[in-house]
Image (cartoon, helix red, strand yellow):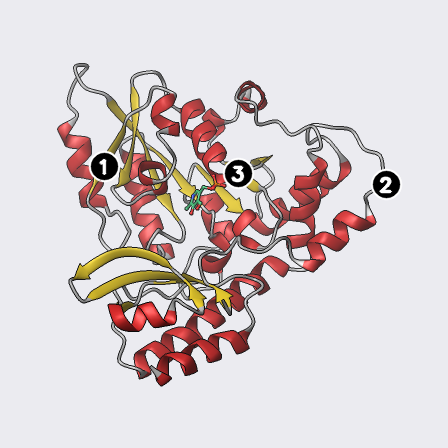
Amino acid sequence: MKYSFLNDYSEGGHPQVLAALNQTNLVQSVGYGQDEYCLQAKEILKEKMQNKNVDIHFLVGGTQTNMIMIASALKDYQAVIAVDSGHIQVHETGAVESTGHKILTCPHQDGKINVSMIDEIYRQHTDEHMVQPKMVYISQTTEYGTYYTLEELKTIYAYCKEHQLYLFVDGARLGSALVLENAPTLRDLAQYSDAFYIGGTKMGALFGECLVLINDDLKPDFRYHIKQKGAMLAKGRLLGLQFLALFKEDLYYKIGLHENKCAHIIKEGLITNHIPMYIDSPSNQLFPIFEKNIYQRLSQDYAMTEMFNVDEDHICVRLVTSWATPEEICHEFINDLAQL
Ligand SMILES: Cc1ncc(COP(=O)(O)O)c(C=O)c1O
């Protein structure tokens, strides 16, 4: 096997993250996220958002963050709206549902939701014999590597405000989106959502997600929710420190640019070799459709995720690039493909 394109968490942590952990290893600090590193990381992030009023909490993983966020925001009878391909719907083992909340889904369009899709679900839920939609969940980037532009985010947020819905943005892969054209910045996200998270695990951290609460209604007692769900890390400094390393010199954005550049090299090569794409993704996840005999030979050297059979002879797969992907391997992959 030459290389795995299975995921953006196939490697450990970025060397700068590891260096920060190593340099501070023997420093003693208070626990549970109330240490100096967490405070510093929060200050830098608030600066970037140009918003001192947000609350920031560091958590360990994405499923945990989604579940705690959604469960803490909703009353027992309230539900969250998402696309059918949404991570909370497909890949989280019913974590949200296990807290008693229904996920109301609609078919996605290029991985995304829009206002008319939200509106249809909202209108179908008319009275107390049904659950009450109270939140819209989107992810940036989406499960199909697409992203919401600032205009799209603003439109969805405006609808949510008009209908008293919270807008929650899952940013497990936010770094890949932040560097794309017309994408919302951290400052925009803090203005046009009620809560969002900045993914670390898929962006060069060993682990960790950074949840930002904007709407005041979502803030009270949040640390109680975290603790009760078993998610308050005693060595919370490890989370703050990693986000400090990712943001103090904008490493986070550099990683996003690198991931996208690698994916772009592969995408251009695929197009040159007449390989169709299932979806036109500009980020670090690609979805080419290969002839099965070509895929079979390619997969002897490169690991990819098999998504679905397009027909008897074709398969759609997913390739993901990471902070650690060497550009050379992307060229080599295309050269190897061209030989087949
Ligand atoms: C968009 C998105 N959200 C959440 C998660 C869940 O993260 P974790 O595996 O850390 O629970 C993932 C993981 O693949 C993801 O892609």
Identify the disc placed on residue 26.
2
- N-term-proximal mark, 1 vs 3: 3
Crowd tier of the residue under label 2, counting other residues whose Cα lies within 10 Å: few below 14, some 14–19, many 20 or above? few
Sequence-wise first label, 3 or 2: 2
Q: Secondary structure at mark 1?
A: strand
Q: Visible in this render: residue 291? A: no
Residue at image position (72%, 43%) is 40
Q: Is residue 77 above or below residue 13?
A: above
Give the residue displayed 36% in from the left and 84% down from the top. Answer: 338
Sequence-wise first label, 1 or 2: 2
Label 3 beta carbon less than 8 Å to ligand 1: yes
Q: Is residue 82 left or right of residue 182?
A: left
| Amino acid type shown at disc 1 | Thr
The count of marks equals: 3
Q: Pointer 3: what residue? A: 61
Q: CA–CA distance between discs 1 and 3?
A: 23 Å
Above or below residue 336? Residue 70 is: above
Q: Which residue, given by chain and number where applicable, does mark 1 sit on?
A: 105
Kindly identify the residue that appears in the image at 57 percent across and 27 percent down. 231
Vertical arrangement, residue 211 with respect to residue 284, above or below: above
Q: Nearer the viewer, residue 134 or 313?
A: 313
Q: Residue 225, position in %: x, y?
A: 53, 21
Give the quadrant of ligand 1.
top left
Q: Quadrant of residue 55?
A: top right
Amino acid tagged 2: Leu
> Between marks 3 and 2, how big is the CA–CA gap?
25 Å
